[in-house]
Image (cartoon, rainbow, N blue to C red):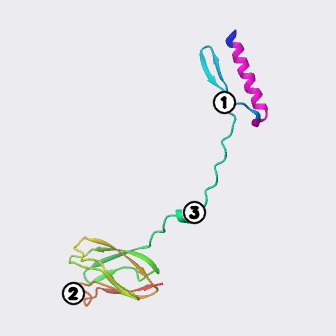
Amino acid sequence: MRASFLLLAFLLGACARESGDASQQSPPEATTVAGNTATAPSNTVNPPMPQEKDDPTNRPAPASPMQDVQLIEYAIRMPESVPAGTVVFNVANAGKEDHGFEIEGPGLETTTQLLKRGDTAALEVNLKPGTYTAYCPVKGHREKGMRTTVVVR
C-alpha cells in the first residue's frame, strides 16, 4: 500500500511540474519505491551554445595548386599554363636515364636535385605572371628536346 502511495505521489508531482512554469520548477527529486530509487526526468533545456566567431587567424592555409611533371627521354610532360602564385611541381622521372627539372623566368631560376629512374621530387615556387622555360639541366638533354614553355597567368 505504501508503495502505491509513493508511486501515485511521484506521478502527480511529475504532472504538476509539466504543467507549471519551467522557471519555477525545482530540480528532479529522487523517489524510493519498493527499495528502488528513481529520478524524475528533467524538463530543463540545455542552454544554447554561443555562436562560433569567424576568426581569420584560425583558418587553415589554402593548399598550393599542384602540377604534375613527368620527365622522360628527351621530353617534359606538364601543363602549358599554370596559375600565378605559389605552385608545387610534383616531378617524377619516368625515363631510363637520370633527369632533373629546372624552371626559370621572371625573377626565378630554381631546380630539383638529380633524379634517378623512378625518383620523385616536389618543387614549390612562387610564380609571377609571365613566360617561363622548364627544362632538364642534365648536359645535352635540353638540346635533345627536354624543354618546354610555361605561361603563368
Report x, y in % for residue 148.
Answer: 35, 86
Which residues are the magenta region? 4-23
Residue flagged by tag 2: what amino acid is it?
Lys
Q: Nearer the viewer, residue 146 or 152?
A: 152
Mark 3 highlights which residue?
Answer: 55
Q: Is residue 57 above or below residue 27?
A: below
Q: Earlier in the sequence, mark 3 or mark 1?
A: 1
Q: Earlier in the sequence, mark 2 or mark 3?
A: 3
Residue occupying image coordinates x 42% and y 79% = 126
Tell me whether circle 3 and circle 1 mark residues in contact (CB < 8 Å): no
Report x, y in % for residue 2.
Answer: 69, 10
Magenta stretch contains residue 153 = no
Q: Separation of disc 2 and disc 3 at Cα?
A: 51 Å
Crowd class of label 2 (few under 14; some 14 to 19; many from 20; radius 10 Å): few
Mark 2 highlights which residue?
Answer: 139
Q: Earlier in the sequence, mark 1 or mark 2?
A: 1
